[in-house]
Amino acid sequence: MTQEAQAPVRPNVRLVLFGLMIAMMLAMLDNMIVSTALPRIVGEFGGLDHFTWVVTAYVLGTTVSTPIWGKIGDLYGRKPVFLTAVVVFLIGSALCGMAGSALFGGADGGMVELIAFRAVQGLGAGGLMVGVMAIIGDLVPPRERGRYQGMIAGIMAIAMVAGPLVGGFITDHLSWRWAFYVNLPLGGVALVLLIATLHLPRHRTEHRIDWWGAALLSAGITAIVLITTWGGNEYDWASPQILGLAAFALVALAAFGVVERRAVEPILPLGLFANRNFALISVVGFLLGFAMFGAMNFLPLYQQTVQGASATNSGLLLLPLMFGMLVVSLVVGRAITRTGRYRAFPIVGGVVMTAGMALLARLDVHTSKVESSLYMVVLGVGMGFLMQTSMLIAQNSVEQRDLGAASGAATFFRSIGGSFGISLFGAIFANRLADSPAGGSFGGGGEAGAAMDLERLRDLPAQAREVVLGGLADAISQVFLWAVLFTVVVPVLAWFIKEIPLRTANTPPAAPADEAETALAKTPTP
């Protein structure tokens, strides 16, 4: 196979970065905005039994498509593939905003339409997240990349907190449909800006799409996401449905492994995992997503129930978390750019993140907002050390031709970890609450966590309310205590990461640093 590349035109990196940051903001912000609009959506469409699929469909579309977008970008060029992902995301956003309208026949099928359109939106979002990281990898050598990826980490931190605030404002003052329509002007700006300013190398190659690999990977991931969504909620963990999905996932992923070893252009090159750093950082990313996304979902619940904050104010109470993550991400990015060294940061980040989770495990009904804010600062600092450092290590571990696949894999493992974490910690929370004196107060522990009736809580007598709040605080603190068991593994794994000098140009490393990397380097180019 022959490959030629034209010399790239050096773009205005800051202008391109602005467009990329808008795109990343859209992908991260959308899920947070929609969560605050869900009660209004259910009120208009009904379908309470299926409303969680408005979130699940988006997560599923994002997770399934992430590695595929990354590999297609490697094959066909990052710019056209990324712009296509932006267009798919915007089309999905517009369709979501129109779900259940007169254009589609009214509100009768509104919930089903919205779930389907959210899946389309998620497909586009998967391309946005992996595309941003891979494009930065194309534009900026690893030695300089930390600074820019630190900025992206800051945007992710802002999105996590701004989402509930923006969503609450839009839902209260406009309509839930604007939670989706707001993406259109912002996405349009990003699209025009990137079309005009983004210049990347043009590659002419003979392509063979790994359709079987893509199909098997999608099937396996879908089964895993369904297991983590339904397990312990819709069906018991030992039910035929969950066990059948587990068996299907194992078969699909085993077949995927066989197909990838024979594919000319594998969607996820398995040879990447022969590299020690890449394999270790992939597991670190999984654990990071597992603990971070799983446990952090319970902070707003604690703030709104135990601390009595409104939905909008609970977003403001997350500002300490965002502040810690934002500041440290920027400082770490600049430090990596200045020194070229990175190994210490995931080790320190794992230790600090574990400390933050341990502190949050102390939450109870008497914890003040100042105290919980200090705990969140510690957690945010730990996350700031880890978020983009993990992506940088993954990208620096592979050759330039596999940059998209590596970026997609890193994002994929974090997403899958988050999916598992949300499911496991949700089960821990529900079981702990069901065993507490508060378990029967809302018709069962599982329902108490998923659909807390705050008005009913406020109407309870003082003594009964104290019992319920104590049970909730205890169940939430148990979630963070379990998270410690996973975060403590992060610094242990990071200790074994080898400090490989960051490349100062986007070219393959001249000499691999260990036997695993030597084996990877000898793998013939497709």
Image: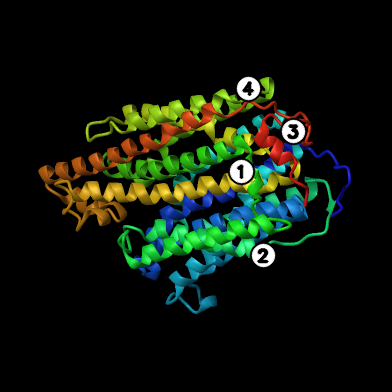
Q: Give x and y (percent) for residue 37.
A: 43, 57
Spatial CA distance of label 4 from label 1 is: 28 Å
Residue at 45 percent of width and 45 percent of height: 165
The disc at residue 141 is 3
Secondary structure of the residue carrying tag 3 is loop
Spatial CA distance of label 1 from label 3 is: 22 Å
Q: Earlier in the sequence, mark 4 or mark 3?
A: 3
Q: Residues within 10 Å of mark 1 (few under 14, many from 20)?
A: some
Secondary structure of the residue carrying tag 2 is helix
Q: Earlier in the sequence, mark 2 or mark 4?
A: 2
Foreground mark, 4 or 1? 1
For the residue marked with disc 3, what is the amino acid? Pro
Q: Earlier in the sequence, mark 1 or mark 3?
A: 3
Q: Which residue is mark 4?
A: 335
> Compared with residue 195, is residue 133 higher up or lower down, i.e. above or below?
above
Quick check: 101 left or right of 197?
left
For the residue marked with disc 4, what is the amino acid? Ala
Q: Give x and y (percent) for residue 352.
A: 44, 26
Marks 2 & 4, CB-CB < 8 Å contact: no
Foreground mark, 2 or 4? 2
